[in-house]
Amino acid sequence: MESSFLIIALLLGLASSLHCVGMCGPIAFSIGLNPENKLDFTLRNFTYQFGRVTTYTILGSILGIIGYSVSFAGLQNPLSIGVGILMILIALLPKNLGAENLGMKPFARIMYQIKSGLGKFLRRKNYSSLYITGLLNGLLPCGAVYAALTGSMAMGGIWEGALFMTFFGLGTIPLMFASVLAGNVVSLQIRQKILKFLPYLMVLLGILFILRGLNLDIPYVSPALESLEINGENHSH
């Protein structure tokens, strides 16, 4: 897997975590961890955070299966181009397009059930409940997560898709971890300014996927088809 895509995935996670603090932050704040016991706080906080990363990784592997099937059929380059275009469209979509507005009421009902489950586990304080809270939190709708999942599909393999989403998840940890520690550590005004950068990052990732699919023989950005085939033969080793 090209390292440039992992770096972008990490940056996408870091930038999107500003959105996570606003949308999922109340969940993190309500965990009620006590920072006075530093070791216990750190372990419990990371238990919750890695629950989210686990969900992202699993979803990435599932999308990676689809990507692998398409690549196996010899359509990796068209897939990469299509994913790049889709990612750019996601970045440009109006932010007020929710699931119900898109005619996805069944999906909205599923999300309601997930949020209800979150409330039940939030009332418990043990490690397993914190981890499950993180798992469910990772399923909540988020445009940046959708963009990252789209990218994981274009990675062309199960492990590659999982690794892409793992890096995305790791990018979300620093700010979310700090938010549990100190509440809303970034003011709304600063978040809004930095969040304006997020669509540009999505567009950049989309462009990289398009270039990757165009097979321009540019190292790290658009490697030749032969290089992709060699990697495909060796990726299981």
Image (cartoon, grey):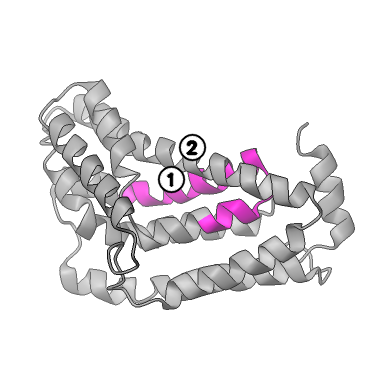
Percent position (x, y) of residue 150?
53, 57
> As drawn, which residue projects farthest toward the right?
226
Label 1 element class: helix
Q: Amino acid at mark 2?
A: Ile
Which kind of residue does numbered mark 1 sit on? Leu
How many other residues sit within 10 Å of disc 2, few (<14), some (14-19) or many (≥20)?
some
Front residue of 164 and 42: 164
Residue holding disc 1: 170
- Residue in the picture at 47% in, 61% down: 147
Residue 221 seen in the figure? no
Q: Any magenta on residue 157?
A: yes
Residue drawn at (56%, 40%), measured in percent from left and top?
A: 61
**Range covered by the magenta-colored residues:** 150-174
Residue at (34%, 58%) from the top-left corner? Answer: 142
Q: Nearer the viewer, mark 1 or mark 2?
A: 2
- Name the residue carrying label 2: 58
Q: Nearer the viewer, residue 90 or 106?
A: 106
| Residue 96 location (% of width, % of height) | 27, 73
Q: Check whether the beta carbons of the residues at disc 1 and disc 2 lie within 8 A of each other.
A: no
Q: Position of residue 165 (x, y in %)?
A: 50, 47
Is residue 87 inside the magenta stretch? no
Asked whether residue 214 appears in the rendered view, the answer is yes
The numbered mark, 1 or 2, whose residue comes first in the sequence reads 2
How many badges with numbers are in the image? 2
Q: CA distance from mark 1 to mark 2?
A: 14 Å
